[in-house]
Image (cartoon, rainbow, N blue to C red):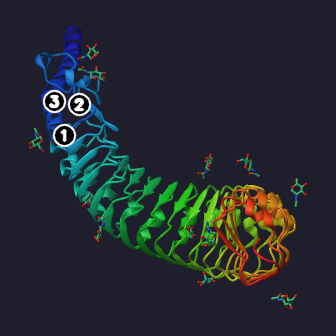
């Protein structure tokens, strides 16, 4: 009995080993055929990426690692079965062969930045082991095959930058392992699939620059693992659901250039990790939520070109990592909160085309890294801060069409990087300061339609780059040199 047992075990192992070798043996010709079909589909290979994809005498040898496992960009598992094909930036042109669907052990297919055209073969849906499918930066056309929804192990699908058309197939909702989905820069149409919330592991979702329309489906609220969401430049409408406040990992939210409407949800203030909140050029109404001041990691907050009609909440002064704050082209009222002077990293502050009143806060001169300040077309009054010259990095000072009064501060001559000073249509008085000639980068200088007087300083002539000089409708005396 004992003897029989000890005799029995080894054959079991032997059978396992044989099975593994047999699997390789069985798959090798099929994989070789598929790889050769891949090569045959390639019509141009200017870099010779596939030059050693050649079948040879050695291929017939049994028991060893198949030679195609050694071809450029091909990798196999220990049993000699192809698990990965990676051919990045190899300038391959042609069509992708349906035979790839026969490499059932394939886990990774990455053809980033090539010139593949034609359809994505639906047969790829047979690659049950596939974890990553990356076809970004090619010219694949036609629809996203419904069959890709059969890829139960797919974690990453990146089809960004192709010429794909049609809708996002709802079958993709079956790819329950998916954490990254990239569909940007194509010509996809229709709505996001109603079942999108089934992808509950999704962390990265981008579909920017397409023709998607409709509203975010209710199930969208379930995508709470989201870290980066970019649906910019589509025709999406409806409102942002308040449940977005549950996306606690959210780091990047870009919904710019769509038709979103309704309020900006105050719940966004709970997404403390947000660094980028770009939702400009939509149809948002109502208030800038005070709660956005909780977003202390924000580096860019761009809400411009909407129909927001509140005051600017002073709480924004707490977002001290902000580099860019864009609130222009809305219907914002009230005055500019002095707390914005706390945003010392700020490089861009645009508040133009609103209904702001009050004075320009002196605190803004703390923003020494500011390169672009635009306050034009509001109802701001009072003088410009005398030490505006503290903004020594300022390149553009756009303050035209307000009711600003008093003199142009002499310190402006310390803004030596100034290229555009647009100050027309205000109520500025006094003389143009001496020393404007120091502004060697000045291209555009407009002070028309003010109440400036005195003579026109000769050193403006030293601004050798000046192309536009507008002095009209003032009370200058003397001649133009
Ligand atoms: C793979 O290529 C290397 C060097 O190019 C060679 O040493 C090795 O024997 C090759 N293996 C197979 C299975 O062809
Ligand atoms: C094919 O080229 C790659 C990269 O140069 C090399 O690593 C590989 O060994 C070559 N394979 C064969 C079969 O010559
Ligand atoms: C391999 O793929 C081709 C193209 O999809 C198909 O016609 C053929 O039946 C497949 N072979 C096997 C064994 O699955
Ligand atoms: C998801 O898979 C199931 C089972 O395979 C299938 O019945 C269903 O139709 C699929 N859903 C979609 C949206 O394709
Ligand atoms: C995208 O699709 C729309 C409508 O389906 C069409 O009008 C437009 O020309 C397409 N754009 C490109 C770049 O293919
Ligand atoms: C998600 O957000 C909604 C609305 O903000 C809230 O009522 C709900 O409790 C949140 N769910 C979870 C799981 O946090
Ligand atoms: C926020 O970001 C930090 C740093 O990247 C990270 O350690 C933390 O886990 C994130 N928090 C959430 C809720 O994702
Ligand atoms: C201003 O910019 C400089 C140079 O980019 C940087 O080193 C500095 O930290 C910035 N200042 C603030 C307050 O962010
Ligand atoms: C001034 O701003 C308002 C918004 O407050 C806008 O409607 C109008 O077009 C702007 N005027 C100019 C000349 O840009
Ligand atoms: C320009 O800056 C220097 C150094 O900060 C300062 O001494 C000077 O008074 C400033 N000039 C004007 C006109 O404000
Ligand atoms: C300067 O700014 C004004 C107002 O925004 C704009 O009209 C003009 O084109 C700008 N000029 C240059 C050279 O940037
Ligand atoms: C221009 O100057 C004249 C003479 O000093 C004065 O009468 C007139 O009110 C001034 N006009 C403006 C618009 O300041």
Task: State the image quarter where residue 464 is shown.
Answer: bottom right
Asked if labels 1 and 2 touch by Cβ distance under 8 angstroms, the answer is yes
Instruction: Estimate the spatial distance between the alpha carbons at disc 2 and disc 3, rounded to whole Å.
Output: 14 Å
Q: Residues within 10 Å of mark 2 (few under 14, many from 20)?
A: some
Residue on which disc 1 sits: 42
Determine the quadrant in which ligand 9 lies: bottom right
Q: Tell me the quarter of the image containing the C terminus.
A: bottom right
Which of the labelled discs sits on residue 430, or is there none? Answer: none
Task: State the image quarter where residue 275 is shown.
Answer: bottom right
Q: Earlier in the sequence, mark 2 or mark 3?
A: 3
Confirm whether residue 274 shows in the render: no
Against 412, residue 477 (above or below) is below
In percent of width and height, residue 293 lies at: 71, 65
In percent of width and height, residue 32 lies at: 15, 30
Q: Earlier in the sequence, mark 2 or mark 1?
A: 1
Confirm whether residue 440 shows in the render: yes
Q: Residue at x 74, y 63 (%)?
A: 461
Image side of residue 233 versus residue 144, left or right: right
Q: Tell me the quarter of the image containing the N terminus.
A: top left
Task: Please tell me whether mark 2 sits on a helix, a strand or a loop.
Answer: loop
Instruction: Estimate the spatial distance between the alpha carbons at disc 3 and disc 1, rounded to whole Å.
Output: 16 Å
Instruction: Estimate the spatial distance between the alpha carbons at disc 2 and disc 1, rounded to whole Å.
Output: 9 Å
Residue on which disc 3 sits: 32
Q: Residue at x 42, y 72 (%)?
A: 236
From the Cβ of disc 3, is ligand 3 less than 8 Å away? no
In the foreground, 412 or 305: 412
In the foreground, 124 or 371: 371
Against 285, residue 245 (above or below) is above
From the Cβ of disc 2, is ligand 2 less than 8 Å away? no
From the Cβ of disc 1, is ligand 2 less than 8 Å away? no
Residue on which disc 2 sits: 50
In the foreground, 362 or 447: 447
């Amino acid at each position: 009995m004992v003897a029989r047992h000890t005799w029995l075990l080894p054959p079991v192992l032997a059978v396992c080993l044989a099975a593994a070798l047999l699997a390789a043996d069985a798959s090798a010709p099929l994989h070789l055929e598929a790889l050769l079909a891949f090569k045959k589909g390639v019509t141009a290979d200017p870099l010779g990426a596939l030059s050693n994809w050649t079948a040879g005498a050695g291929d017939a040898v049994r028991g060893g690692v198949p030679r195609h496992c050694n071809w450029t960009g091909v990798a196999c598992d220990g049993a000699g079965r192809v698990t990965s094909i990676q051919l990045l930036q190899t300038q391959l042109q042609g069509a992708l062969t349906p035979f790839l669907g026969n490499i059932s052990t394939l886990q990774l297919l990455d053809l980033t930045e090539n010139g593949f055209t034609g359809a994505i073969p639906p047969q790829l849906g047979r690659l049950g082991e596939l974890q990553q499918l990356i076809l970004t930066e090619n010219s694949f056309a036609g629809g996203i095959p419904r069959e890709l929804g059969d890829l139960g192990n797919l974690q990453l699908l990146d089809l960004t930058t192709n010429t794909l058309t049609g809708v996002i197939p709802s079958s993709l909702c079956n790819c329950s392992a998916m954490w990254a989905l990239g569909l940007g820069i194509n010509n996809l149409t229709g709505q996001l699939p109603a079942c999108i919330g089934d992808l509950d592991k999704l962390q990265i979702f981008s579909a920017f620059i397409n023709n998607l329309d409709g509203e975010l489906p209710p199930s969208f609220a379930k995508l709470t693992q989201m870290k980066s969401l970019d649906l910019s430049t589509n025709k999406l409408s409806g409102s942002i659901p308040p449940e977005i406040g549950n996306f606690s990992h959210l780091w990047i939210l870009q919904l710019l250039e769509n038709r979103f409407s309704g309020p900006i949800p105050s719940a966004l203030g709970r997404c403390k990790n947000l660094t980028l909140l770009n939702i400009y050029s939509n149809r948002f109404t109502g208030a800038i939520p005070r709660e956005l001041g909780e977003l202390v990691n924000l580096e860019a907050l761009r809400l411009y070109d909407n129909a927001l009609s509140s005051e600017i909440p002073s709480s924004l002064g707490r977002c001290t990592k902000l580099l860019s704050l864009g609130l222009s082209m809305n219907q914002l009222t009230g005055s500019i909160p002095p707390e914005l002077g706390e945003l010392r990293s700020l490089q861009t502050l645009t508040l133009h085309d609103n209904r702001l009143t009050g004075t320009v806060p002196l605190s803004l001169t703390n923003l020494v890294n500011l390169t672009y300040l635009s306050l034009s077309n509001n109802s701001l009054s009072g003088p410009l801060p005398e030490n505006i010259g503290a903004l020594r990095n300022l390149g553009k000072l756009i303050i035209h069409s307000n009711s600003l009064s008093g003199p142009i501060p002499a310190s402006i001559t310390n803004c030596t990087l100034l290229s555009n000073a647009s100050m027309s249509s205000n109520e500025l008085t006094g003389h143009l300061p001496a020393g404007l000639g120091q502004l060697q980068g000045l291209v555009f200088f407009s002070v028309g339609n003010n109440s400036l007087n005195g003579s026109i300083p000769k050193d403006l002539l030293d601004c050798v780059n000046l192309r536009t000089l507008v002095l009209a409708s003032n009370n200058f005396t003397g001649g133009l040199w």
